[in-house]
Image: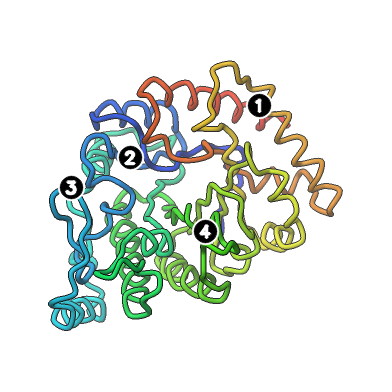
């Protein structure tokens, strides 16, 4: 299930979105900044269809892209649901693929990999928008989020699983370990009055998708950039990587050391989103970030997790996607990450 190569201690990767309208520039930055775990870029400034929700709507029944927005139209729901489940039962991953119009960065990344020296690459990172964030972002004709529609909630879970599967099969030709992140910012508010979903539904939905990812020989991760009940993720037995905002919420995450401990001891990895994105300051230094990680290691050690165990299962990333930032920000953020990675590897 887990990483065979523990040489990944302190390796870095990105979340997904970048603030460029040019895919070539985005890919240049990715391949120079993330030599071990490159990822395909979402480019919402290039085209709104590359936003984290529109990007995954193709062939989801009754959900359409129309004049720069998502529209839910249930008039042909019976017919569309029948086609959907036929393709699902046939495991027709090509039917569920993300087209170039919705993911220019994905196809550019694939073409760049075909020409790249793959020797330094250990893993290829892909991503989907998690089903709860996706369903919470789309409303029906009555203005209710699809999150509250049991029929379409199931459809979305299964569609997202197929879009993850399509990516894994697409990138398998490069013979690298594949990681698929489920981006779930909506679950950052789990447990509040504004997120009326229960724990069992979250664990069941994430388990269905991560089981499918694992069955293809890939690793599954979840990215949540808010403060949440982190035990909902450690409760997903087929989840390999938990990515959290280690700059903004490290103290909150440490409150869940009792559930993080069995997660790490079974080979799960924590991806520390240690460089802030929205609150990024050019005055931030590697020393500042390392001190935060050191404090986290010390706190976990007091709760029975050795620094060695945590470090062996540590990846690093920005705290969130960078799609809304100024175009000058990514290279500064990624440069800090690279330097921090080198520092972590000397611990």
The foreground one among 124 and 63 is 63
Left-right relation of 326 to 300: left
Image color mode: rainbow
Circles 3, 4 touching at the beta carbon (< 8 Å): no
Work out which quarter of the rendered image holds the C terminus and state it.
Answer: top right
Residue with the mark numbered 2: 41
Q: Secondary structure at mark 1?
A: helix
Q: Earlier in the sequence, mark 1 or mark 4?
A: 4
Furthest residue to the right? 302
Residue with the mark numbered 4: 187
Q: Is residue 117 above or below residue 110?
A: above
Distance from the alpha carbon under mark 1 to that under mark 3:
44 Å
Q: Secondary structure at mark 2?
A: loop
Left-right relation of 264 to 45: right
Residue with the mark numbered 1: 343
Q: Nearer the viewer, mark 4 or mark 2?
A: 4
Residue 22: image quadrant is top left
* Crowding near the residue tagged with mark 2, few <14, some 14–19, many ≥20 C-alpha atoms within 10 Å: many
Circles 3, 2 touching at the beta carbon (< 8 Å): no
Q: Residue at the spot x=61%, y=47% of the render?
A: 6
Q: Which mark is residue 242?
A: none
Residue with the mark numbered 3: 68
Q: Nearer the viewer, mark 3 or mark 4?
A: 3
Q: Nearer the viewer, mark 1 or mark 3?
A: 3
Q: Nearer the viewer, mark 3 or mark 2?
A: 3
Distance from the alpha carbon under mark 4 to that under mark 2:
22 Å
Distance from the alpha carbon under mark 1 to that under mark 4:
32 Å
The foreground one among 72 and 115 is 72
* Crowding near the residue tagged with mark 4, few <14, some 14–19, many ≥20 C-alpha atoms within 10 Å: many
């Amino acid at each position: 299930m887990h990483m065979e190569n523990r040489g990944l201690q302190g390796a870095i990767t990105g979340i997904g979105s970048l603030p460029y309208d040019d895919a070539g520039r985005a890919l240049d930055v990715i391949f120079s900044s993330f030599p071990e775990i490159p990822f395909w870029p979402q480019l919402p400034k290039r085209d709104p269809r590359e936003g984290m929700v529109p990007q995954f709507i193709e062939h989801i029944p009754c959900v359409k892209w129309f004049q720069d927005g998502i529209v839910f139209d249930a008039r042909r729901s019976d017919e569309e649901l029948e086609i959907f489940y036929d393709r699902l039962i046939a495991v027709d991953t090509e039917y569920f693929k993300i087209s170039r119009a919705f993911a220019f960065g994905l196809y550019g990344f694939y073409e760049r990999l075909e020409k790249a020296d793959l020797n330094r690459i250990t893993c290829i990172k892909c991503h989907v928008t998690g089903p709860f964030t996706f369903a919470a972002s789309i409303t029906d004709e009555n203005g209710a989020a699809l999150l509250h529609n049991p029929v379409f909630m199931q459809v979305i879970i299964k569609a997202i699983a197929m879009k993850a599967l399509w990516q894994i099969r697409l990138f398998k030709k490069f013979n690298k370990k594949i990681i698929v992140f489920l981006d779930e910012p909506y679950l950052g508010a789990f447990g509040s009055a504004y997120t009326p979903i229960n724990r069992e539904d979250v664990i069941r939905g994430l388990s269905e998708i991560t089981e499918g990812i694992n069955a293809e020989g890939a690793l599954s991760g979840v990215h949540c950039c808010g403060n949440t009940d982190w035990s909902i993720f450690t409760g997903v037995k087929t989840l390999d990587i938990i990515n959290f905002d280690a700059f903004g919420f490290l103290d909150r995450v440490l409150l869940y050391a009792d559930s993080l401990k069995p997660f790490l001891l079974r080979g799960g990895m924590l991806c520390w989103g240690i460089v802030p994105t929205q609150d990024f300051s050019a005055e931030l230094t590697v020393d500042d970030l390392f001190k935060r990680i050191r404090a986290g290691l010390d706190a976990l050690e007091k709760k029975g997790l050795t620094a060695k165990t945590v470090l062996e299962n540590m990846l690093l990333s920005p705290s969130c996607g960078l799609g809304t930032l100024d175009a000058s920000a990514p290279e500064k953020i990624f440069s800090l990450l690279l330097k921090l990675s080198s520092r972590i590897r000397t611990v």
